[in-house]
Amino acid sequence: SAVISQKPSRDICQRGTSLTIQCQVDSQVTMMFWYRQQPGQSLTLIATANQGSEATYESGFVIDKFPISRPNLTFSTLTVSNMSPEDSSIYLCSVGLSTVDTQYFGPGTRLTVL
Amino acid sequence: GENVEQHPSTLSVQEGDSAVIKCTYSDSASNYFPWYKQELGKRPQLIIDIRSNVGEKKDQRIAVTLNKTAKHFSLHITETQPEDSAVYFCAASSPGYALNFGKGTSLLVTP
């Protein structure tokens, strides 16, 4: 498996501001994904982070609200833009070492928007 | 797209009993079925997975079965212990694609 870190681990933000979350892996991975987990809920895919090209977003998530970067095979960022209290959630990245490999999750970023 | 249904949403068992969680999926192209355990405040941790060319897989007290024809798979935990208490998520995917998760089962093992 890979060692995955996320920064920040938690943050409290004011509405209307933006927060960028970083996901760093200790080895090159093929697949990187961003999920959201609202309190007491399951995990919902936001987007697939593609290296060298635009992310692929799921229905209900748009690039203007959740811009994603993936400059290389070990790093990705997710920005939550123009935040509202409804964006309060845990945001998790997950990685797969190959297209047929198991996916592992980062520790998550707990975001509270006031 | 893939739709994964998970039952029950909550499950309470006595220590030492068995626990069974069931999931169904809709997309016949899905061929990878992992199970994650999530303790409070922690990340989801993979506990076992199965691929579509296998009907059953076991790892100590945990086993997963897959019925591709019926499109359902199940997690079996035997000899449950209080530390098994957590939320369990099933998921389904095709290779190279993100996981589609069930809604989760909150398992409580009482001493």
Image: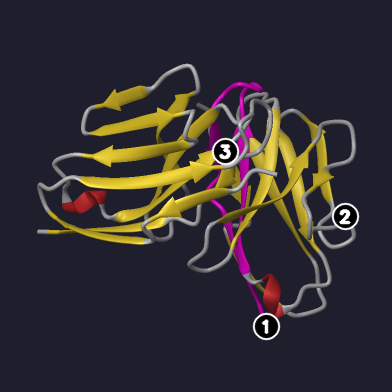
Q: Secondary structure at mark 3?
A: strand
In which quadrant of the rendered image does the C terminus of chain A lie?
bottom right
Instruction: Identify the residue shown where x is 64% and y is 43%.
Output: B2
Q: Would you say B76 lies left or right of A12 here?
A: left
Tell me the subunit letter for badge 1. A
Assign the magenta stretch its main secondary structure.
strand
Q: Residues within 10 Å of mark 1 (few under 14, many from 20)?
A: some
Mark with earlier residue (1, 2): 2
Tell me the subunit letter for badge 2. A
Mark 1, mark 2: which one is toward the viewer?
2
Q: Position of residue B54 (x, y in %)?
A: 42, 18
Q: Secondary structure at mark 2?
A: loop
* Callout 3 amino acid: Ile
The Cα–Cα distance between marks 3 and 2, rounded to whole angstroms, is 24 Å
* Callout 1 amino acid: Leu
Q: Position of residue A99 (x, y in %)?
A: 66, 23
Residue A114 is marked as 1
The Cα–Cα distance between marks 1 and 2, rounded to whole angstroms, is 23 Å
- Residue B109 in the magenta stretch? The answer is no
- The foreground one among B70 and B95 is B70
Residue A63 is marked as 2
Mark with earlier residue (3, 1): 3
Query: Which residue carries the number 3 mark?
Result: A4
Q: Would you say A38 lies left or right of A84 here?
A: left
* Callout 2 amino acid: Ile
First to last magenta residue range: A89-114
Please, is residue B18 above or below residue B105 in the view?
A: above
Instruction: Identify the residue shown where x is 67% and y is 24%.
Output: A28
Residue B80 is marked as none
Q: Residue furthest top?
A: B53
